[in-house]
Image: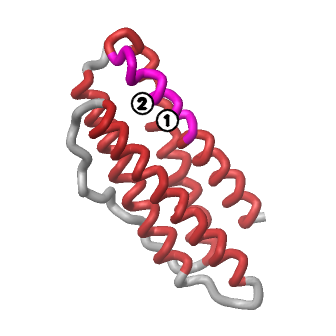
Amino acid sequence: MPTKEELIAKLNEALTLEHQARIQYMTHAQHISGPNAEPIIERLEELAADEKDHEEKFRELIAAYLGGTPTMKMHEPHPATTLDAILNTNLEDEKSAIDLYMEIYDMIMQMRDELKYSWFQCIHKIREIIADENEHVMELNTIKG
């Protein structure tokens, strides 16, 4: 069974991904141009806002529910300048994040007895984040066509 310290470490890893994703979406939005650019820019900025919300949820899980210290580090970004590269890069990043978040979900499920009263909030928040990230994959695929 995972320890609380291992769970906090995984949550901090997830937080680095969310820091990176928010900055990456905002930066990638600045590279979009052309006659259909505006709705794509708006959607990338909305995705960045979602990632900011995920950051806040991870910080709350780490600090308030588990007594850990949230990281201020950022995962390595993936630069891209063309629409196709931007969409492909972010799709891969979203899928990698979902894989990690499913691992965290499994850890939380295994730790139900240890987490006791914080278990429900932990599982609820990670499920919300996973659902959002799956939605991001669908939306990026839709933009991609």
Q: Quick check: 95 above or below 145?
A: above
In the rendered structure, the answer to whether residue 39 lies left or right of residue 28 reads: right
In the rendered structure, the answer to whether residue 65 lies left or right of residue 5 reads: right
For residue 13, what is the image quadrant? top left
Alpha-carbon distance for marks 2 and 1? 8 Å
Mark 1 = which residue?
126
Amino acid type shown at disc 1 = Ile
Please tell me how many numbered marks the rendered image carries: 2
Number of residues whose C-alpha sits closer than 10 Å to that of mark 1, classed few (under 14), some (14–19) or many (20 or more): many
Residue 29 placement (x, y as % from top left): 55, 78
Is 3 or 86 nearer to us in this picture?
3
Q: Which residues are magenta?
A: 115-128
In the rendered structure, the answer to whether residue 7 lies left or right of residue 137 reads: left
Residue 92 placement (x, y as % from top left): 54, 53
Mark 2 = which residue?
104
Q: Please name the residue shown 30% across and 37% down the image.
A: 64
